Image: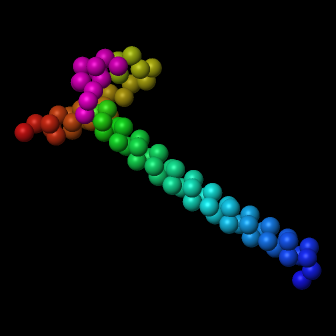
Amino acid sequence: MDATGTIGLEIALNESVEKRLLDLEASALEFLWKREDELARIIDQELTPRRLLEAHLRHLPIKLRPRVARALAEREGQQSP
């Protein structure tokens, strides 16, 4: 293999390694984002008073009543001794 072929092979290998590293980094960031989003959702549910949540939901342009009612019922069930 001549010098040009060797350099071309080295460039191709470096690009391949860099792509794999970027893919791994993107996967790690996506995992962390989802985990932090889930933690934020849990914290919001625990710390947001029910009246405030219901008032906020009334002002939304879409209605989420059945789903929210179910979530609030589950939340109340978890807090009851």
Q: Residue furthest bottom?
A: 1
Q: Is residue 67 visible?
A: yes
User: Which range is magenta?
Assistant: 46-56
Identify which residue, 3 or 49, lies in the foreground.
Answer: 3
Identify which residue, 12 or 53, lies in the foreground.
Answer: 12
Identify which residue, 8 or 58, lies in the foreground.
Answer: 8
Q: Residue furthest left?
A: 81
Q: In the rendered view, does 61 fall on the left or right side of 2?
A: left
Residue 9 figure quarter: bottom right
Q: Position of residue 16 (x, y in %)?
A: 71, 66
Q: Residue furthest front?
A: 3
- Residue in view at x 16 percent, y 40 percent: 78
- Residue in view at x 36 percent, y 28 percent: 64
Q: Position of residue 56 (x, y in %)?
A: 35, 19
**In the image, residue 55 lies in the stretch drawn in magenta:** yes
Q: Quadrant of the N terminus?
A: bottom right
- Residue in view at x 78 percent, y 68 percent: 12
Q: In the rendered view, does 81 fall on the left or right side of 40?
A: left
Residue 44 figure quarter: top left
How many numbered badges does the structure rendering display?
Answer: 0
**In the image, residue 62 lies in the stretch drawn in magenta:** no
Q: Quadrant of the C terminus?
A: top left
Magenta stretch, main secondary structure class: helix
Q: Is residue 69 visible?
A: no
**65 vs 11: above or below:** above
Residue 38 figure quarter: top left
- Residue in view at x 47 percent, y 52 percent: 31
Q: Position of residue 18 (x, y in %)?
A: 68, 61
**28 vs 10: above or below:** above
Q: Position of residue 24 (x, y in %)?
A: 57, 60
Identify which residue, 16 or 64, lies in the foreground.
Answer: 16
